[in-house]
Amino acid sequence: MKLFGIDFKKLILAPMAEISDAAFRKISRKFGAGLVFTQMVSAEGVARHNFTTLRYLSFARDEKPIGVQVLGNDAKILGRAVKEILKFNPDVIDLNSGCPVAKVTSNNMGSGLMDDPKHLGALVNSMVKAAGETPISVKFRLGKDLSKINVVESAKAAADNGASFITVHVRTSTGRYDERPRYEWLAKVKEAVDIPVVANGSIFTLEDALFIKENFNVDGLMIARGALGNPFIFKRYNTFVEKGFDPGPPDLSLVKETLFEHINLLEREFGEFNALDKAKKHSIWYLKEYNGISILLDNIFALKSLSSLYEFLNKHFDNIQNGTYPEEDNSLIQQKFFKRVVFWLLEDNYNVLSKTA
Ligand SMILES: Cc1cc2nc3c(=O)[nH]c(=O)nc-3n(C[C@H](O)[C@H](O)[C@H](O)COP(=O)(O)O)c2cc1C
């Protein structure tokens, strides 16, 4: 088992397609993420040197320790992809065995790999052989659906074939985000393997993180949606674990400074045009718990440049600071955030499509 430099005591930032880009990874590392991941990249794209795929997995030194996540179902191609990825010198390479999207599972990739633990083991074996000293990990869901939970068998196949650690998102593939997280399975996985087990699923607060850590005997915790607009959670968790106290939520000036730094990094990474939509999304996430969120949602999508976004946000932060906005019940927004997060804005009550059309 190889685990150089990976600190499981700190929260891990999950791979998130279109979100865990270099900007978000840098911000998360700045606030103390112990490990960050790229979004999933296609093993075939890597093996073929596809430019867009390689762009997704490139990273800078200040993002390390970093894991690159691959999606694939062919042992030879995964082996070749691992060899290519090693040129970037990541700290771990992860096999995606959890993606529930039909386009992925119908090609026997992502959580589709869990249908056949023996085949999954062969894939891990090929990756481990190609990886040399670099650790290989696997990220699972519980199984296909509640009647076909086979995460224990799958985790064993990964561990028996040399995986260095595994992560379990404690929901099934068909359950998406609608199922309650079933943390109780973590203990069964822990019993079955002797490699570290990382828990993932519905960690939104420091209390959630501590509850899971204390009650389910896992080695590490991975956070996805809970870090959106809230990279501060890394620092809160680490401080609590290391020093025994919660530094508390950030004050508004730190939220503003961090959001502006995040937008600046997005602009450097993607250029103004492509950064704009991403910057709007992150602005909403950073500001979702403050008064004025419905005004933000009503106006932000019409902004056509980063400079107009900065101008709008400057006023918005001033209004929050000055108490200009009325108290609002943003529980509906919170509910949608927890459930869907990225696409919640497209739902009926906030029909963004009609606003941007
Ligand atoms: C927008 C989005 C994109 C995601 N992309 C990936 C991905 O590329 N690879 C992956 O393994 N999981 C992906 N996930 C799943 C998360 O990594 C995580 O397992 C899941 O959201 C549960 O964690 P959470 O409850 O902390 O959000 C994605 C999740 C979201 C919300």
Image (cartoon, grey):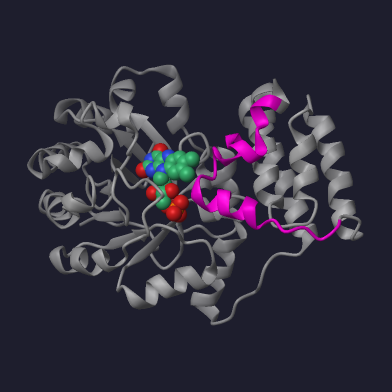
From what the image shows, is residue 43 above or below residue 59?
Answer: above
Q: Nearer the viewer, residue 180 or 188?
A: 180
In x, y percent, where is residue 20?
A: 50, 41
Q: Quadrant of the C terminus?
A: top right
Q: Is residue 336 left or right of residue 38?
A: right
From what the image shows, is residue 273 above or below residue 191?
Answer: above
In x, y percent, where is residue 174?
A: 30, 43
Q: Please identify the quarter of the rendering in which residue 94 is found.
A: top left
Q: Is residue 224 left or right of residue 97?
A: right
Q: Is residue 161 left or right of residue 12?
A: left
Please report the residue visible at 74 percent of the width from the left and 40 percent of the height from the top. Answer: 297
In x, y percent, where is residue 271?
A: 67, 24
Report the magenta residues as a range: 326-354
Q: Residue furthest front?
A: 348
From what the image shows, is residue 187 above or below residue 177?
Answer: below
In x, y percent, where is residue 158?
A: 16, 49
Q: Quadrant of ligand 1?
A: top left
| Residue 351 among those drawn in magenta | yes
Q: Nearer the viewer, residue 303 or 279?
A: 303
